[in-house]
Image (spheres, rainbow, N blue to C red):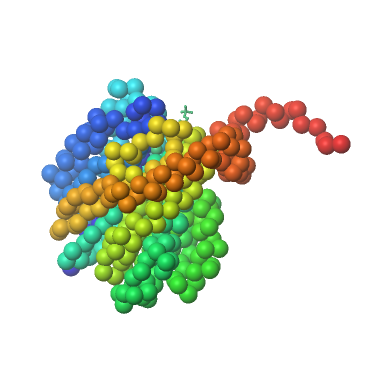
Amino acid sequence: MKELTISVIKADIGGYVGHSASHPALIQRAQEALQGAKDRGTLVDFHVSYCGDDLNLIMTHRLGTDNAEIHQLAWDTFEACTEVARSLHLYGAGQDLLSDAFSGNVRGMGPGVAEMTFVERPSEPVVIFMADKTAAGAWNMPLYRMFVDPFNTAGLVISPSLHDGFNIEVYDVKSAKAIVFNCPAEVYDLLALIGATARYVVKAVYTKKGEIAAVSSTERLSLIAGKYVGKDDPVCIVRSQNQFPAIGEILEPFTMPHVVEGCMRGSFFAPLMPVPLRFAQTSRFDGPPRVVALGFQIADGHLVGPRDLFDDPGFDQARQQCNALMDHLRRHGPFEPHRLPMDEMEYTTLPQVLEKLQGRWVDMK
Ligand code: F6R
Ligand code: MG
Ligand code: MG
């Protein structure tokens, strides 16, 4: 049985206008580059998409995860698109390509990566989530709801194919360690960590038989660069139906616009708004942060789709709630809890401002 790999590799390599959206010329350039790779037989198929100012390369191939040829292809494509971004004087051209010396794997070089390998089922529905103006931990709550919470996913209770639960892999992005929780047995241990979204990030979900169910990009740009260069704007791949949650169970968590870090200058908490692609660009206050869900059927490695899954009035109320919450948070201006707590502000541009106060501090009386 031939294994298929889906690689979703994304980067912000230039915004139009400012940090708000992606210029069509970048998408076209990426399509040309990936079409070349498909013609050469490197890729089985591809789809180029965007969320805000992030360019998302969705690729299927037979080379496995962390493959040097695929990562080189993504890097070269981002470089080619950066040239276009520079010629149009787009904002932040080449922003996420943090190194000049590419070494065979884009991990740790700026782009976000989510990849999974599996044997394709007779019918293989897959959802690709793409977010803008937020951080890697944004998927923690939705992935928890999809794979662990019986109030969200009815199948965990009433379907024999989901009733065993799932194993959840968590990364500690600050100490570069990983841990796997057997759920539902270890749900409280899981929650003890993943409630702290800036540090603990759900990397992957597996069935109890070891089959991959979901994988996310966990790269934290600020930790890689050692300074603020923009938000992670993560992606996530989720397999659906049968032994995995149904499409409706995968999308249901986004009816509750949970509050994530990101937004203006990557420095604020704001609600995550589920949107169709045509609204996947922030004009207001670099927020509310956006999430898009593209649904595909995989057919012998080919991507049939996408269906723009949040293009559904069923999410109108979530969008309204998001706007109401955003208005309320915005009125806090530079105050917490709209602004991130001080230890997270370390990774923003604020420390440069505080530096000039250094010499003025005296002991309290
Ligand atoms: C978020 C993001 C933006 C910028 C903001 C200021 O990921 O990139 O919120 O931080 O637009 O950008 P500069 O400092 O480049 O004007
Ligand atoms: Mg940008
Ligand atoms: Mg972005």
Q: Residue at x 51, y 59 (%)?
A: 194
Task: Examine the image and state in which quarter residue 65 appears.
Answer: bottom left
Query: In the displayed structure, would residue 8 be above or below residue 99?
Result: below
Q: Give the side of residue 3 with respect to residue 152, left or right.
A: left
**Residue located farthest toward the right when viewing the structure as drawn:** 365
| Residue 345 x %, y % | 58, 40
**Residue located farthest toward the left when viewing the structure as drawn:** 39
Q: Residue at x 47, y 38 (%)?
A: 263
| Residue 321 x %, y % | 44, 46
In depth, the one of 204 and 264 nearer the eye is 264
In depth, the one of 99 and 125 nearer the eye is 125
Q: Residue at x 37, y 74 (%)?
A: 157
Locate the C terminus by quadrant: top right
Locate the N terminus by quadrant: bottom left
Q: Is residue 8 visible?
A: no
Q: Give the side of residue 276 with respect to residue 92, left or right.
A: left
In depth, the one of 41 and 159 nearer the eye is 159
| Residue 287 x %, y % | 44, 37
Task: Examine the image and state in which quarter residue 156 appears.
Answer: bottom left
Q: Is residue 328 visible?
A: yes
Q: Residue at x 48, y 64 (%)?
A: 179
Number of numbered discs on residues: 0
Query: In the displayed structure, would residue 268 be above or below residue 66?
Result: above
Q: Give the side of residue 4 with respect to residue 19, left or right.
A: left
| Residue 30 x %, y % | 24, 37
